Amino acid sequence: MGRRATGWLYGIAGALIAGSAVLMIVWAWTRGEVTVMSVLLLVPAYLLLRAGRSRLSKRGGD
């Protein structure tokens, strides 16, 4: 798999995790049950999105 394809996969995975984490935080917030674990889900999402962006911005490879 090429560098760009891996970047896209990282980006998609990060976006899915970030979306679900935000939905979970909003849902928990409405019930008054926001936990540290729900907020910590944003960390791997951020790391995956950053890695995907980094791989997509590099020149060459593939």
Image (cartoon, rainbow, N blue to C red):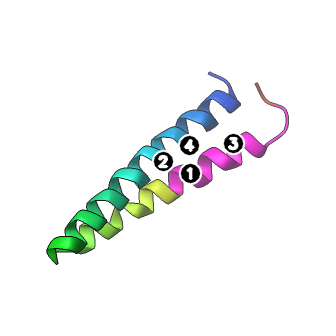
Q: Amino acid at mark 3?
A: Arg
Residue labelled with disc 3: 55
The magenta region covers 47-60
The amino acid beneath tag 2 is Gly
Picture coordinates of residue 37 (x, y %)? 25, 67
Q: Is residue 21 above or below residue 1?
A: below
Q: Secondary structure at mark 1?
A: helix
Q: Judge from the rendering whether residue 22 lies leftward or rightward of residue 57; answer left or right.
A: left
Judged from the image, the secondary structure of the residue bearing numbered disc 2 is helix
Residue 35 in percent (x, y) is at 21, 73
Circle 1/circle 4 CB separation < 8 Å: yes
The Cα atoms of the two marked residues, 1 and 4, are separated by 5 Å
- Disc with the residue nearer the chain's start (3 vs 1): 1
* Residue 49 is covered by the magenta coloring: yes
* Residue at the spot of label 2: 14
Whether residue 25 is situated above or below residue 8 in the rendered picture: below
| Residue at mark 3 to residue at mark 4: CA–CA distance | 10 Å
Q: Seen from this angle, which residue lies furthest top?
A: 1
Task: Check the image and report above or below for 37 versus 50.
Answer: below
Magenta-drawn stretch contains 36: no
Q: Which residue does the image show at 24% across and 73% down from the upper left?
A: 29
Residue 36, picture quadrant: bottom left
- Per the rendering, the mark at residue 11 is 4
Q: Residue at x 41, y 62 (%)?
A: 42
Marks 2 and 4, how far apart in space?
A: 5 Å
- Asked if labels 4 and 2 touch by Cβ distance under 8 angstroms, the answer is yes
Q: Tag 1: Cα neighbours inside 10 Å, few (<14), some, or many (≥20)?
A: many
* Residue depicted at 29% across the width and 66% down the height: 25
